[in-house]
Amino acid sequence: MKSQKLIGMLAGLLATNAYAFIAPTNAPAGLKVKSTVIRPNLYTPAISAFADEGGDVALDRQSNSVRQMNGFDLMGVSVAAPTSQSIEKAALDLVASRPDVFGVSAADVSLNPKGTHVDAENQFVNLQVSRSGLRISDAGITMRFKHGHLVSVKSETFSEAVVAPVVALGSVTNTGDIAAKALNSQGYIARGSMWRVKPTSAGYSLVKVDEYVVAGADNAWVVQVDTTNGSLYELRSKNFNMSGKATATVYPRYFGEALAPTPLPFSAVTNASARSNERGEFQSQDDFNAPKMVGLTGQFAKVHTQAGSDLAATATKAGGSWDLKFDIKPTAKLWDNNDMAQAMAYVNANRIITMAKKYIAPTWFNQPLEVNVNHEQHCNAFWDGSSVNFFTAGSESGMTCANTGVIADVMFHEWGHGLDENTGGIEDGAMSEGFGDAMALLFTDDSKVGIDFMPLQHKPVRDMSVLKKFPDDVQDEVHADGQIVGGAWYDMYTALKAKLGNAKAKDLYAKMLFKGIYSMPKMSDVYESMLTLDDDDGDRSNGTPNLCEINKAFVRHGLAKAESRCH
């Protein structure tokens, strides 16, 4: 981010629009900023259709429909001693009684709750217009009274507009994904569907659009997707500050580090938008009812504690926005903290799922991951076929262990089992264990897996840099044997970083893991899967860009034959 002032970019949602002083120039590459506002071109006919009712009219050149009426006590409407309630009632009654003028029924209009103004001289009422239960964004009725006498009516109901037919939405049926893809964004917040009015050669048509707020690189954008064909109907800047942010004070990796405020992404927040975005930002429903969170539930993860109560927090106002913070305090034994386990499990589940979604889209991601923390057992964690599970701190079999929920490595490892099972099934337990460790390595860049799992001895569970070779070191125990392939992955990743640099190596390694899991049910399949994913021309016979780095790593662990061109 260029400035802290840009933190709230996925914002505004239900709030009043705040416009920039100058037009934004940072539109996403390849996209054109466009705002489609319908402003009818009016003309006054030679003979007024409302002359006998105390007024004259202006017609829309596009469709010849009545748009503007001016006069005194128009259509016989006046209100003695006007109040907000009496003026609003008069406006609604007039629309209901004159379908010949407005072209809509009483069921199709509603008060704009912010559009009424009443003082001793002037009274204004604004009505919203709908069709088939959806608001017409460009439509509205404005009535202007003077001392209670109706003197001016703007009628943009577009009752003459016909619904545009569906052309082709294509294979993508989730318009939110279309909006997010247009700005290369991970997250979006839906604002609902509406009609937009579009000029045609015969007058006007109604186009149904779905509207989203999407975060771009350094701005927030309102994106409307045309549901008739999947194209972008409107893209406009929305340079708002978010009205709130949900965070938790957690350890970045484990309890040996300094606490840091960390966003709670995609989380359910009451008195606010449906959920926060990927940065934990949300929009409150109003300025009076504080947003709240009870438990950590979101689009991709749902945390349940097996001991104690679910975490809960109520936002407080800070600098004009809501601060919804789980300020989790360290305990006397830093590694024994059940509240911290809840927050860290949620944060780390979202970290790994968000990254995985950049590469793959298994149906497993279509529902929240069930995360159970604080089981009243010690020194372990597990994947049970449908959920990840973490134990409280304590002693077991002579070992004193940390709460496994407060070590990020453990989440990444157990989630790896879940991915393995949901992309074909776990056939080789050792491969799955090695894969879990490889997942942890992707996020920690550390050969040690389960750092400070035994906090009194400051020992991890495993070290991927320890050489284990097939078949010499096979023990027929899945965790021990998993170190063979886990070590190969560690050596491969280390070599790729030395050759490509950290960023490119991380992207390639992530692609190899997330995509490769579909084609490596057994440890003996991993090497070929890695080469296939590294290949760049569809011809394995001429090698791959990183053949030697991959080959040397897997040869060292007995999982490949040496390539003569590399040794």
Image (cartoon, rainbow, N blue to C red):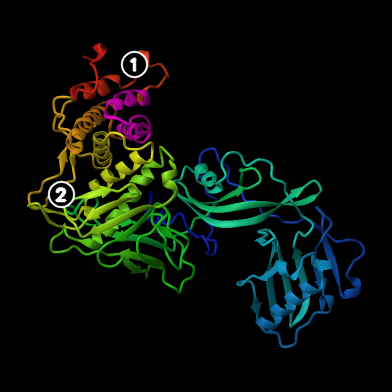
Seen in the image, is 134 located left or right of residue 387? right
How busy is the neighbourhood of tag 1: few (under 14 within 10 Å), some, or many (20 plus)?
A: some
| Residue 397: percent from left, percent from top | 9, 51
Badge number at residue 61 = none
- The answer to whether 557 is drawn above or below residue 97 in the figure is above
Please provide the residue range marked out in magenta. Answer: 504-533
| Residue 133: percent from left, percent from top | 67, 62
Q: Residue 408: in sight, yes or no?
A: no
For mark 1, give the secondary structure.
loop
Which residue is under mark 2?
A: 453
Q: Quadrant of the C terminus?
A: top left
Judge whether residue 272 is colored magenta.
no
Seen in the image, is 461 located left or right of residue 182? left
Badge number at residue 543 = 1
Seen in the image, is 483 located left or right of residue 155? left
Quadrant hosting residue 172? top right
Please, what is the three-letter code of the amino acid marked with disc 1?
Answer: Gly
| Residue 132: percent from left, percent from top | 70, 60
